[in-house]
Image: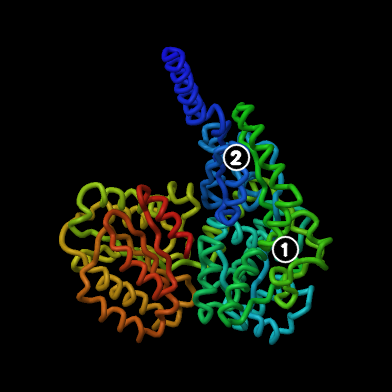
Amino acid sequence: MKSIFRLGLMVAVVAIVAIVYVITSGSFGGPRSSLHIVSGSENEALEPIIQEWGQKNRVDVQMSYLGSVDIARELAKGTATEFDAVWPANSLWIELGDEQKVVKHATSILRSPVVLGLRQSIAQDLGWIGRDDVTIQDIQAAARDGKFRLSMTSATQSNSGASAYFGFLYALSDNPDVLGMEQLANTETQDKVRDLLAQVDRSSGSSGWLRSALVENPAAYDAMFNYEALVIEANQTLVQSGQEPLYAVYPANGLSVADSPLGYISKGDAAKEEAFLALQAHLQTSEIQELLNNQGRRAGLIGLMAESADKSVWNPDWGIDLTRAIAPIPIPGSDVISEALRLYQSELRKPSLTVWVLDTSGSMEGDPIAQLKDAMRLLLDPQAAALNLLQPSSRDITMILPFNHDIGRLTQVEGSDTEELRRALNAVVQLQADGGTDLYYALFKAFEELGTWEAEGTLDDYLPAIVAMTDGASATDNRDPFFNYLQGLSYATKVPIHSIAFGDADEAQLQELSNASIGRLFHAKSDLAAALRKAKGYN
């Protein structure tokens, strides 16, 4: 009996071990497949829906978020990309990047028009409440006349900015059937678009950040071109805090719509493709489409459900119009997209006036200062800058101010002359690391330099910014004097301080500077060059 009992016990133990092995090895209950999706940041709020589906269907879904240009660059790698699927805000980024035609099954999951979110009282004063015939030209004229301060994201770094920009091109070239090279080459159209972009008061590299900046600093913003969904989100927060909401103006011409296509990157893996199609079908079910609608995204037959729509989301008092026929501009070919973005970056956008404040203290010795020099090449080497759509325009002004416990020699470049950029890059290459760290004194000197343009009355002709790159904690002797100086500076509110933190940077110090100036703190982690690309998108 004992031997039978021992045998039975051994069988039971082996069975338990086998069950544990099967479960932990993924043969039962674990992931059957995996999907790595590269997406625009506007979909981050939807990730819980996707992860819940993945858990129920034993698919390990990983989401990575990149800017629109970086998504297009990933697609240009074809099957060499690490991603299995792509979910940009707009089909134009697939059109631009998918040169090898590896994207299959691309289907729009949701839509959001790019609208002008304008302070409701200003919209009332302009007589725009309840109107459906306000044109891009009307918006341009009102901004030029100083009726409101206009903000939008960069067309070469963010999809909402690109969508608005392509809308401008269509509207100001008399609405061609499809935008072509002929319209882009038209100097009269270029002048009109240049004039409209000159009215931009604040720029950003992220649609979500622009929304948050407006909500957190309502006195600094009057209007933004952004997704309808983000105008709704902004209003929900503004109203909760007792602030004035925005009024959504849908341009009567040049209206762009983010169509949010989810596409599969075909690499010959049948299991991944099956999992992708199942996820895509799930996102198109009526249950999920309703969830998206409740988040302010247009999904399914939302235009037919205007009467039953949640008015706390789709609030007509905010100008949100579900009954309006949305006829978006058509997406041009990849060659036209590429040329239009090049034209924006090099000729049409409002010029930048940027002071790059570069840490050369002793803690930068070795790899940190080498990384800094490599990152600055993205700006100062014409070929590298063009590859990342970061090339300076003929009207840009770039200043480089190295610092440690003191400040180094200022280098200034006006425009995009190759020799001048090479001279500036050589100055950066020659930098040596030593000494202490006094960021506050360096920022004081940066504002002093910008004071020249303010004194001449030309600072408003530019998008000014200070970008500080540092890997350490600053001495604080000059902290209080700097903030006192900033409070008394007439043009301080026009100049955001953006910071790029790497190494052992004191992020609390940098965040305080960003908060005081409506700037942004970027975390370089292991990729300083990527952080620099993001920061440049903010002016």
Depth order, front residue of 327/420: 327
Q: Quadrant of residue 132?
A: bottom right
The residue indicated by pointer 2 is 85
Q: Residues within 10 Å of mark 1 (few under 14, many from 20)?
A: many
Side of 141 where 472 appears, left or right: left
- Identify which residue is drawn at 25% across, 47% down: 367
Is the N terminus in the top left, top right, bottom left or bottom right quadrant?
top left
Using the rendered image of the protein, determine whether residue 445 is visible from the camera's viewpoint: yes
Pinpoint residue 361: horizontal percent, then vertical percent: 20, 60
Pinpoint residue 61: horizontal percent, then vertical percent: 56, 41
Q: Is residue 321 above or below residue 373?
A: below
- Identify which residue is drawn at 65% across, 64% down: 229
The residue indicated by pointer 1 is 255
Q: Is residue 20 above or below residue 514?
A: above
- Residue type of the residue flagged with mark 2: Ala
Pinpoint residue 483: horizontal percent, then vertical percent: 31, 80
- Identify which residue is drawn at 23% across, 67% down: 474
SS under mark 2 = strand
